[in-house]
Image (cartoon, helix red, strand yellow):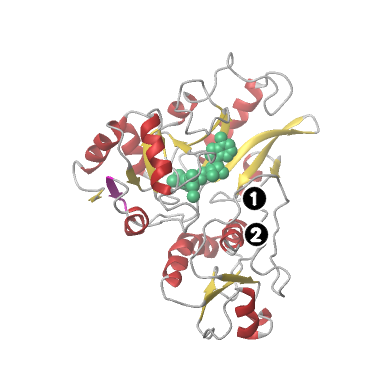
Amino acid sequence: MEVLNASESGAVERAAGVLRVGGLVGMPTETVYGLAADAMNGEAVARVFEAKGRPSFDPLIVHAASAGQAWGVVASEAGWPMGWAADGRAYEAVMGWAERLAGAFWPGPLTLVLPVREGAVSGLVTAGLGTVGLRVPGHPVARGLIEAAGVPLAAPSANRFGGISPTQAPHVVDELGGRVGVVLDGGACERGLESTVVGFGSADGGLVVEVLRLGSVSVERLEEAIAGRVRLRVHRGTSRPAGSGAGVESGAEAPPAPGMLDRHYAPRTPMVLVDRMAEVPGGVDRLAAVCGLEDGKDAGRWGVFFSVPAGDGREDETVMLSAAAGFFERLRDLDERGYDGIVAVRAPAVGLGRAINDRLERGALKA
Ligand code: TXA
Ligand code: MG
């Protein structure tokens, strides 16, 4: 495996060459590092699933260099499925909204789920769903790589399945070293949380945007962009949160929905969540019980993770942006220090704080 400095001449072109022959590239984006493959090459995409240890029912996001290239992956009016998101063949209505969202957030951390054009990408990318998640990344190196490869790139986050997402090139090496041909080092990811994934649906006879995964575009920002017609449909897992029934609230805030995506973004160290440190009930004994630590084991070493710094102003957008940017890196660091457990303090449930809390809730679920 080779790490190439993306700013060195020829590096992006070399990585594109790896993609063109069906290889995998660790790709910087503004959210997290992706594990990229030619989205049209089924064998290359299969290697992505294998390298991550990811189940094949979980679809990959397709990255395009421009909105024009992205729309090329979407079903045409003639191929548009009947009744998708709205009554009849609501192609114009849905695409009108999609273009508006793209205009507001692309290039950037918003993924749009739309009906896929037959044959545009490998069926493995979409897990046979008939829809595809699309985004134009904000990181210029990512767009340069897609352009140089000449094809849209399928790229999940470049971590082993279920683990903490990588926000720097060395994290990709730690997670996938040996399983990926080349990592393009484009520096630390500016946003630090994955893209917000949205689909479309109908309510009261009108279209709504459905948030399928909370992420770097806050729900408030989405509402601003499309005058309020946003609904949360975030999948919640069925596993019990580590804290439930044991005195530490799970605090799940998203509505229950059918689906999988339970334990995810998870440190190896057991983690419990609290809203404030003052709330830790019964101290270390209680926490040890919550985390299922064995009797007699020294449970005296706890790492404390302030997802957003304590104190005034923690709801401010700039404070939250910087907390989000360092979120996975700080959690990864803490995870490597050999603590018996991590006590993580939730973010305020506004703006990016909701995406941060979503990651914490999933990361705190027991395996
Ligand atoms: O910021 C990001 O989105 C990063 C960077 C690399 O772009 N990518 C990323 O990919 O987070 P991944 O594979 O870790 O998460 C993709 C998620 C899937 O698990 C699924 O929830 C959703 O996006 N998704 C993708 N295609 C979908 C589809 N057709 N329908 C519903 N959800 C879809
Ligand atoms: Mg991921």
Q: Which residue is mark 1?
A: 220
Q: Position of residue 282 (x, y in %)?
A: 68, 85
User: Visible in this render: residue 111?
Assistant: no
- Magenta stretch contains residue 283: no
Residue extending furthest toward the left: 9
Q: Quadrant of residue 40?
A: top left
Name the amino acid, label 2. Answer: Val
x and y, in percent, of residue 120 in the image: 45, 23
Q: Secondary structure at mark 1?
A: helix
- The spot of residue 6 in percent (x, y) is 26, 48
Q: Amino acid at mark 1?
A: Glu
> Mark 2–mark 1 contact, CB under 8 Å?
yes
Above or below, 112 relative to 358: above
Disc 2 within 8 angstroms of ligand 1 (CB)? no
Report the label total. Answer: 2
What label sits on residue 350 in the rendered view?
2
Residue 147 vertical placement versus 363 (above, below): above
- Spatial CA distance of label 2 from label 1 is 8 Å
Sort mark 1 into few (<14), some (14-19) or many (20+) by Cα contacts within 10 Å: few
- Residue in the picture at 48% in, 28% down: 123
Q: Residue at the far front: name it.
A: 295
- By secondary structure, the bulk of the magenta-drawn segment is best described as strand
Label whose residue precedes the other's in the sequence (2 or 1): 1
At horizontal 33% and vertical 32% (from top left) the residue drawn is: 147
Quadrant of residue 128 in the image? Answer: top right
Numbered badge on residue 134: none
Front residue (pair 315, 361): 361
Range drawn in magenta = 181-186
The quarter in which the C terminus is drawn is bottom right
Residue 72: x percent and y percent?
Answer: 46, 23
Locate residue 151: give its quadrant.
top left
